[in-house]
Image: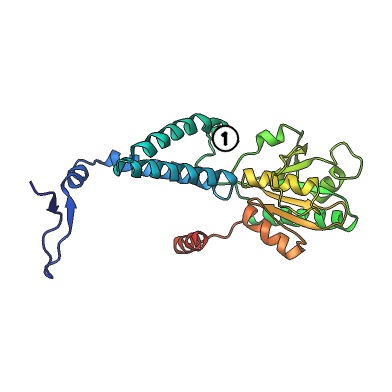
Amino acid sequence: MDMYVDYFSSTPQGFSISLPGHLRSLLSTMEVLDIFDIILVAIILYKIYEMLEDTRAITLVRGIIFLMVLTMLSNVFKLHVIDWLLSKAVTLLFVALPIVFQPELRRTLEHLGEGRFLAHSSFLNDEDAENVIQELDSALRELSAVQTGALIVIERNMGLNDICRTGVQLDALVSKELLRNIFFVNTPLHDGAVVIRGKRVVAAGCLLPLTENRALSTELGTRHRAAIGLSEQCDALVLVVSEETGIISVAENGHIHRKIDSIQLKEYLRPIFAPEKMSLKEIVMNWRKKKK
């Protein structure tokens, strides 16, 4: 039996496409449920990648994939010593995975429990979105003018219930007056972070994880390091007002952008609360640009 069989009959130009016999046999046995199964697995893998993208965990994932590929190659080329060493290393690595990825696993299970794993953020209508953006902009401008330190976390797709539990639960509408009172010097909640979900302040006085990046400027204080630390572990947008200089900064995906003016701040906030409606073509084009 030939290894390859014609998948399509010859075209008028004499062109034909051949597939391996076992592959054609596999395709011929596929049913609708098999296709649905493949699509479902692809969606789950994509959502996991989306959660890990632009975080420190993605570098670990790439390292694991590299080791697995290297193990398969050593097996193909009969490199027995290397194959034995790599197989043992991979086994130990999988034992260590629950420890290494403990924060990501906890968040993933939390999303599954909340039914948010395959869901997008709950966006606001145009009026509510503009109100929240304006209140945040006004609050940060006023806090900056009097050099009052502030740390504001805006939740996106990843739930921050574990962060909220470290502070005081509020569940109040976002307003500049509320934010100014929370961050007023010497008040009990002044040194913690505020968490905003949609148009509501969920909690205040929350504790954030500090970044372990030692390459950061010594000018950055605890608030800035906490903002970067949280943005490394989730997709939240974190706003910071420096107590020493009044400079407004934004932390996102493990990076911090300083000296943000009102126009730039609104450009960061608007896609979170009121994203533009795009066509399928625009979504695909933006996705390609992001990958480049």
Instruction: Name the one closer to the observer, 2 or 44.
Output: 2
Instruction: Name the one closer to the observer, 108 or 59.
Output: 59
Left/right of residue 264 with respect to residue 179 in the rendered view: left
The residue depicted at 62 percent of the width and 39 percent of the height is 159
Left/right of residue 19 with respect to residue 80 in the rendered view: left
* Residue sticking out furthest to the front: 81
Q: How is the image coloured?
A: rainbow
- In this rendering, the count of numbered labels is 1
The residue depicted at 74 percent of the width and 51 percent of the height is 239
Left/right of residue 100 with respect to residue 154 in the rendered view: left
Spot occupied by residue 182 in the image (x, y as percentages of width and height): 84, 43
Q: Considering only vertical position in the picture, is 131 above or below 27?
A: below
The residue depicted at 52 percent of the width and 39 percent of the height is 117
The answer to whether one can see residue 197 in this image is: no
Q: Which amino acid lies under the numbered mark 1 shown in the image of this protein?
A: Val
Q: Which residue is mark 1?
A: 100
The residue depicted at 87 percent of the width and 36 percent of the height is 188
The answer to whether one can see residue 193 in this image is: yes
* Residue sticking out furthest to the bottom: 13
Q: Residues within 10 Å of mark 1 (few under 14, many from 20)?
A: some
Spot occupied by residue 227 in the image (x, y as percentages of width and height): 72, 47
Spot occupied by residue 87 in the image (x, y as percentages of width and height): 40, 34
* Residue sticking out furthest to the top: 95
Asked where in the image residue 162 lies, by quadrant, the reply is top right
Q: Considering only vertical position in the picture, is 122 above or below 113?
A: below
* Residue sticking out furthest to the left: 1
Spot occupied by residue 265 in the image (x, y as percentages of width and height): 72, 60
SS state under label 1: helix
Asked where in the image residue 197 lies, by quadrant, the reply is top right
Instruction: Name the one closer to the observer, 207 or 276.
Output: 207
